[in-house]
Amino acid sequence: MEKDKTLTRMAETPVNKLMLSMGIPMIVSMVLQAFYNIVDSAFVSNMKTGGEEALNALTLAFPIQMLMVAVSIGTGVGTNALLAKSLGQGDKKRAAKVAGNAEFLGLVIFGACLLFGIVGVRSYIMSQTSNPVITEMAVSYLRICCVLSPGIVFFSVFEKLLQATGLSLYSTIAQISGAVINMIFDPILIYGLFELPKLGVRGAAYATVIGQIASFLMAFVFHLRKNTAVENGLRFMKPDKIVIRGIYAIGLPAIIAQALMSVMTYGLNLILGGVDESMVTAYGLYYKIQQFILFAAFGLRDAITPIVSFSHGMGSNERVRQGVRYGMIYTLIIMAAGLIGLEIFAVPLAGVFGLSGNTQGLCISAIRIISLSFVCAGINIAAQGIFQALDKGGYSLVISVLRQLLLVLPVAFGFALIAKKNTDLSWLVWLTFPIAEILSAVTAMIFLRKTVPQGKAAEPCTFPESVV
């Protein structure tokens, strides 16, 4: 039966092959997620008027978009690991409750996004800029993304439900479909093709949410039809505080880790804006370019987590160690390739977006300097997935706080003070990221030595009484 085949595949397929078969679709899926963040920028930056202001507006809106993704994906990560572990332990009733409560949590998250979209967007944008043109562009873009956010919220949930049972190909198909729809509608709605109204940045927002909703609907259908390892039903959506606690015991560190990206970007917008508004635009664009590499590593991490978690649940230390080993190797290959690619293509990548000479130069220097941190960033990203799978979410949180907050904002602020006095030294700010990733990677390796089991056999992993 299909259900038994799914569980047998997770338990018996050689880990290196399992990680590739699960990881490649997830990598493709996450890289396509990066398209949502950069395609809009590519089109709006090439508008005949106000292109660079529009790009700046999207940069200011981006931290809130990341925060919505953080809460949604973090909830999905907790669901993913808890569901995989439940299936590894043979507890299918628990797995059904985990899935149902994840769907309930999606409704709660969407409600919060909707409320912020109605009452909070303008105040948030005005905290970063006093430019009225940029303010209006950013407010209109972000409000649409928040009010019409069920696509990104629920796709994150159903994507993780599919990935937890090894059906990542279907989540990738849904992601690809949404990305294609987004790219088709972007020029149509932004530039007003086919006699439709020219909407500018609002068109970019509408194209994004249309693509996200399409991905969600496809993932939902695939879950109902293909995910036979998980029982579905409205009765499983009844809130269960013990299950929810179990989801967020794993997922909360992931939410905080993702949310710190939002906090970091918001803080950097303020710091860089104090030096030169062009630095905000340059960093915002670089950040979206680098996401093609980082999101690929995130995709592989999303394969590492259920594989290691399932193995941990069934008590196989050997498969846990293999998951750690191959996860690290494959992640480092991705990041090394990304480093080489960005160093080679820094100039043409920056040239795609029609930036002014100063902004383009700042973007090129950001690409070449920040990318030097990729290998250490890969270690940190893989380690965080491993910690989440082995019930060490606290370690994952520490790494996130180090690499996205404590070792970034204070250092960037110090370099920014130097850059204010001598704009020729603006490139020093980009050194913040290699410094943060190197020190965080050292900490991650220490934590890994304490976490990864070394014995021949693990004791069967069971839920604490408070979670059962």
Image: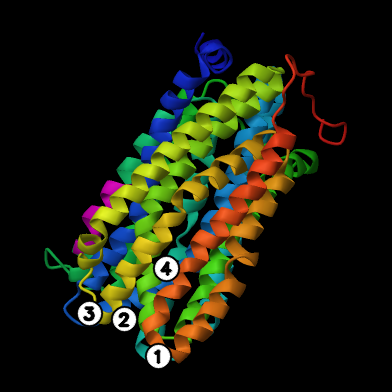
User: Please, what is the three-letter code of the amino acid marked with disc 4?
Assistant: Ile
Which SS does the magenta portion mostly show?
Answer: helix
Task: Report which quarter residue 353 is drawn in.
Answer: bottom left
Which element carries disc 4, helix, strand or loop?
Answer: helix
Residue highlighted by disc 4: 144
Residue 373 magenta-drawn? no
Q: Quadrant of the C terminus?
A: top right
What is the span of residues highlighted in magenta in the rendered image?
A: 179-187
Task: Report which quarter residue 359 is drawn in.
Answer: bottom left
Residue highlighted by disc 2: 53
User: Please, what is the three-letter code of the amino acid marked with disc 2?
Assistant: Glu
Task: Report which quarter residue 209 is drawn in.
Answer: bottom left
Q: Which residue is found at the position 50% from the left and 81% from the top?
A: 416
Q: Position of residue 216 (x, y in %)?
A: 43, 44
Q: Position of residue 460 (x, y in %)?
A: 78, 18
Mark 3: few/some/many CA within 10 Å (<14, 14-19, 20+): few
Q: Report how far apart the C-alphas of labels 3 and 1 lie in the structure.
A: 21 Å
Dot 1 or dot 4, earlier in sequence? 1
Residue nearest the observer in this picture, 45 or 16: 16
Q: Position of residue 217 (x, y in %)?
A: 41, 42
Residue highlighted by disc 3: 357
Q: Report how far apart the C-alphas of labels 2 and 3 lie in the structure.
A: 15 Å
Which element carries disc 3, helix, strand or loop?
Answer: helix
| 179 is higher (above) or lower (below) than 424 | above
Residue at the far right in the pictured view: 465
Residue at the far top in the pictured view: 1
Q: Which residue is found at the position 43% from the left and 48% from the top?
A: 295
Dot 1 or dot 2, earlier in sequence? 2
Examine the rendering and report whether any part of residue 358 can be seen. yes
Dot 4 or dot 3, earlier in sequence? 4
